[in-house]
Amino acid sequence: MPGTTLDFTLHADGGATRLAVEIHHAVIAGWTGRDKAALERHIVELEELGVPRPASTPIYYRVAAARFTTADTIECTGPDSSGEVEFMVVQSGGRRFLGVGSDHTDRTVETYGITVSKQMCDKPVAPELWALDDVLPHWDSLIIRSFATIGGERVLYQEGPVSAMLPPGEIIAGYGPGLSAGTAMFCGTLAAKGGIRPAERFAFELEDPVLKRTIRHAYDVRILPIAG
């Protein structure tokens, strides 16, 4: 079965261990907002870029598992792509793990084919995971945020609690096939402060203020020229 193997550091059971995860099934869950007003703002934000409204909410897009990467640089065709932070649930070895990644998307292609746009760019993920069960008791206290470096200036791009999205169990339940072994699912994002825009570097993180820990990752965007 095609896919990719990513090496993570797993923080669980009071320690840190290396964990190699084979990902064969990658899913991007979109429009997962718990707050319907905030969800509408994000839909309008994308409509302003020419992206049509979703047929349903949530909606689930498949992408090639090989798009998931822990690399610190990705290459994108043209200057019109951008990242957005998302919490990620991974099913592996009979357990569920929590991570964080960036649904980097080609915004030009998104205006005429959302599913295709999701496939156009690599999906950077942080090389660390937590046991999902360890955070479920205080789930709504978790925070996701991102920073974009634009014109050499690093700015806060997104920030807010994961409670802005549906709980992971509800998001997973809405996906017909469920989470089989080797599945990684991005579970939703927040509106961008100042609007969606490209950046030369994108950083993202997931903070657990209760257990006082944070998963972080960042990547540079290398733009490939469009010929013809």
Image: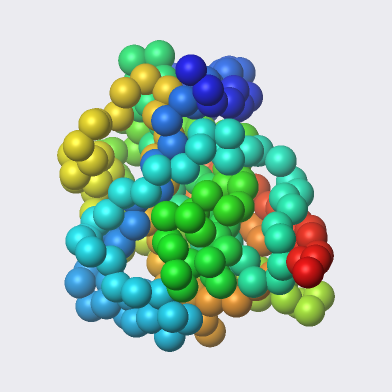
Q: Looking at the rendering, which quadrant does residue 105 occupy? A: bottom right
Report which quarter residue 115 is drawn in: bottom left
Q: Is residue 17 above or below residue 4?
A: above
Q: Position of residue 201 (x, y in %)?
A: 73, 63
Q: How many marks?
A: 0
Find residue 143 and report its image quarter.
Answer: bottom left
Give the x, y percent position of residue 189: 41, 61
The residue lying toward the viewer, choosing from 138 and 149, is 149
Q: Is residue 216 above or below residue 228?
A: above
Question: Relative to residue 36, is residue 24 drawn left or right?
Answer: right
Q: Is residue 50 left or right of 15 when viewed as pictured? A: left
The percent coordinates of residue 228 (x first, y second) are 78, 69
Give the color scheme: rainbow, by chain, secondary structure or one colour.
rainbow
**Front residue of this view, candidates 202 and 81:** 81
**Where is residue 87 shown, x and y percent of the image?**
43, 48
- Please state if 125 lies on the left or on the right of 191 as rendered: right
* Residue 93 in sight from this viewpoint: yes
Q: Looking at the image, which residue is at 41% across and 75% down?
A: 51
**Residue ID at (52%, 49%):** 119
Name the foreground residue: 13 vs 228: 228
Q: Is residue 97 visible?
A: no
Residue at image location 44% in from the left, 37% down from the top: 26
Q: Residue at x 24, y 46 (%)?
A: 171
- The answer to whether 57 is drawn above or below residue 50 in the figure is above
Q: Residue furthest front?
A: 228
